Structures are given as structure tokens and as C-alpha cells.
Amino acid sequence: MQKSKPYLTPEEYLKMERVAEAKGEYYKGEIFAFAGASFNHNKIAANVLGELTAALKNTQCFALTSDMRVWAADVEFSAYPDATVVCGEPEFHDEHKDWLTNPLVIIEVLSKSTGKYDQEEKFRLYRSLASFKEYVLIDQYSVYVQQFWKTAEDEWKLKLYEKLSDVVAFKTIAAEVSLKDIYRKVEF
């Protein structure tokens, strides 16, 4: 990620982002631009989104693409997760309905340049969202998925998946996705 113009208010960032050609994440007054994603990254994200959309079609939950910004006001952070799940009515920062504030599940596909950030700092920032209860990180270079979920005791648990025969059973939504489906048509 490259740092661009510093010290913008959230409103200034959002005004710029609404007309920008490239996406940028926001954190405490700074915008961080990021490069486009690889084929594997896009294929994995599309596979997961398709599986979740099918699994959730008869529920009050729905999946959103990476074009949906998520806003964590308490820590002044905005990002574009690879996939997001909302249950019930979506809540937004303003009437434009392009800054979601109540994701339940967030999914990120890891890359070499952002993997550590997604696993550590971004996860910490997402946890400031009261609605956020489940985080799934998917490796694009090997069969490896990390699933974190928040328990009733406000603790985060972790389960790892490393075989194509494994199935991610989401803890907060009525959905299961096999690693075989996550990695369909992905070549390492």
C-alpha cells in the first residue's frame, strides 16, 4: 500500500473516494491506495461470494462485494473487504448508503503485500465494530483458511483449514463453504 495525501477528515476522504477511479483505505486522516488484485485473489473472492449468496438466499442475511466500504467510526477506519455479510437491515454512515457500519462477517483474501496487515492491524480495527462477529482469511497461494469468531464471552476463537476436503462452517450465519469450492479453478 502506498501512502497518499495525509490528514483528511473522514468526510473529505469519503467525498474524494466517491469520485475516485482507484480505491483507497482510510485510517485517521490518511489514505492508503492499493494495487489491483491477482487472478487467484479475484477468483477466490468470487467463489466465496457466490457460495455465500446461494447459502443465504432464504435468510435475512446477504453477502456484499468488495465495492462496499466498511466504516469503523470509533477508530476512524474505512476499508473495502473482499466480501462482507450483513444480517437484517444494513446501517450506513449517511444517506448515500455507500459506507456500511454494521457488517457481521468480513472476509479477506490474503496477498503478499497486505497479508500481515489483514491478519493483525486490520483485524484489530475491524474489532471496534460492535456488529462484527466473524473474520475469515483466505490464502491465495496455498490451501489455507483461518476462521475467527467472537464467542458470547467476548473472546475470539480460531479454527484453521488446510485440506480441500475441509468445510468452513460459519459460526454466525447459516452457511457452509467447502475449501474445494473456495479454491475452484484456482491454480497455485
Image (spheres, rainbow, N blue to C red):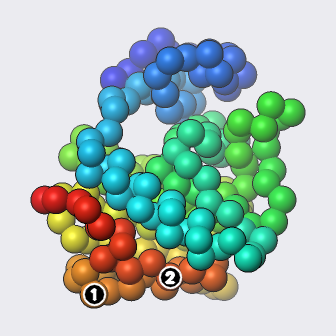
User: Which element carries disc 2, helix, strand or loop?
Assistant: strand
State the image coordinates of residue 132 (x, y, percent, origin top left).
63, 63
Q: Residue at x 22, y 71 (%)?
A: 143
Q: Which residue is mark 1?
A: 165
The front one of 67 and 135 is 67
State the image coordinates of residue 43 (x, y, percent, origin top left).
34, 53
Q: Tag 2: residue type?
A: Glu
User: Which element carries disc 1, helix, strand or loop?
Assistant: loop
Vertical side of 121 occupied by 44: above or below: below
Circle 1 Cα neighbour tier, 10 Å, few/some/many (<14 / 14–19 / ≥20): few
Q: Which residue is mark 2?
A: 176
Q: Earlier in the sequence, mark 1 or mark 2?
A: 1
Q: Is residue 99 toward the left or the right of residue 28 in the image? A: right
Vertical side of 187 occupied by 147: above or below: below
State the image coordinates of residue 74 (x, y, percent, origin top left).
69, 45
State the image coordinates of residue 19 (x, y, percent, origin top left).
62, 16
Q: Quadrant of the N terminus?
A: top left
